[in-house]
Image (tube, rainbow, N blue to C red):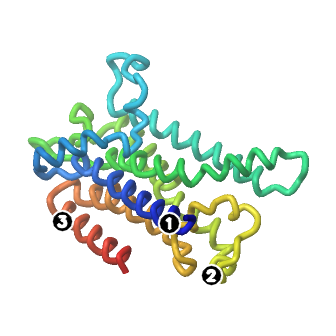
Amino acid sequence: VRSFKQNLSIKAKLLLGFYQVSTLLSSLYNVPYPYAYLRVMEKVQFISVDFTRFFPWQCIFGSGYNFTSKLYTTGGLAVAISVVSWIMVKFASDDRQENPRPWAKKAVSWLPTVLFLAYPGFSACFFETLQCRDIYGSSFLVADLSIRCSGAAYDILRVVAVVCVVFWCCGLPLVVLSLLWSERRSLLQERRPSGLAEHLQDFYAPYKPQFWYFESLEFGKKLLLVGVVPAVASGDLAGAVAALLIAVVLLCLILA
């Protein structure tokens, strides 16, 4: 029963990861999509966990709510998640008795799930800030054509986006890899890790011992498909073709 449940959870996780990326493609790549595809993606849009759609931000910010407000809101949530995660990891890895270690260890076990759900949607928002399009000699932000990609206001947005890309989009896979790196020998020998890694088993339990690092590859896949490729190709058809090739290569890797 345990083996069946684990096998089912692996497939469910891969399926959720697939739809997380799929629901974001229509807003990241400037190519025509079949209406049936867009209709299905609209129904499963919640999988991408876009927190800016779950709360009445327009009622909070008023008529001035735009992509700038969305970026600041998403960036603030990313900072909050990062700070809370750092505090939980610090408490869970501290051996002093006066710290609330039982609470911290139970809380930190939910960290892989939270990061798995929030990572692609947040990353897509940060990279959208770097995608501009030339219209009659002027450059405008693809996500919000009312914003020009020039001037002091956009420079501030770009700085915020770059900081979020460095610390959230690129830093998160590296942090996950570093947390498991010290326990790689135990994982390769199929022994239960000790210390903090014991409570982060969702990062490595779904995979074979020799592929303990595969969760970082999953983060890297999402980073390429929803962030790097659309930003470099400016969302054009060439970027969509490159993303398709990446997806096929990763599918072959998973099947292997």
Q: Residues within 10 Å of mark 3 (few under 14, many from 20)?
A: few
Badge number at residue 4: 1
Question: Nearer the N terminus, badge 2 or badge 3?
Answer: 2
Q: Residues within 10 Å of mark 2 (few under 14, many from 20)?
A: few
Residue 193 located left or right of residue 99: left
Do the numbered discs 2 and 3 sit on residues whose CB atoms are within 8 Å?
A: no
Q: Which amino acid type is shown beneath numbered disc 2?
A: Leu
Quadrant, the C terminus: bottom left
Query: Nearer the observer, disc 1 or disc 3?
Result: 1
Residue 219 located left or right of residue 138: right
In the picture as drawn, the residue positioned furthest to the right comes out as 97
Q: Position of residue 202 (x, y in %)?
A: 57, 60
Q: Position of residue 132 (x, y in %)?
A: 24, 47
Relative height, residue 90 to residue 184 (above, below): above
Describe the element under mark 1 as helix, strand or loop.
helix
Q: Which residue is disc 3 drawn over?
A: 241
Badge number at residue 188: 2
What count of labels does the image hold? Answer: 3
Q: Position of residue 88 (x, y in %)?
A: 70, 48
Identity of the residue drawn at 56% across and 63% down: 203
Question: Nearer the N terminus, badge 1 or badge 3?
Answer: 1
Question: Nearer the N terminus, badge 1 or badge 2?
Answer: 1
Q: Which amino acid type is shown beneath numbered disc 3?
A: Val
Identity of the residue drawn at 51% across and 62% down: 5
Badge number at residue 117: none
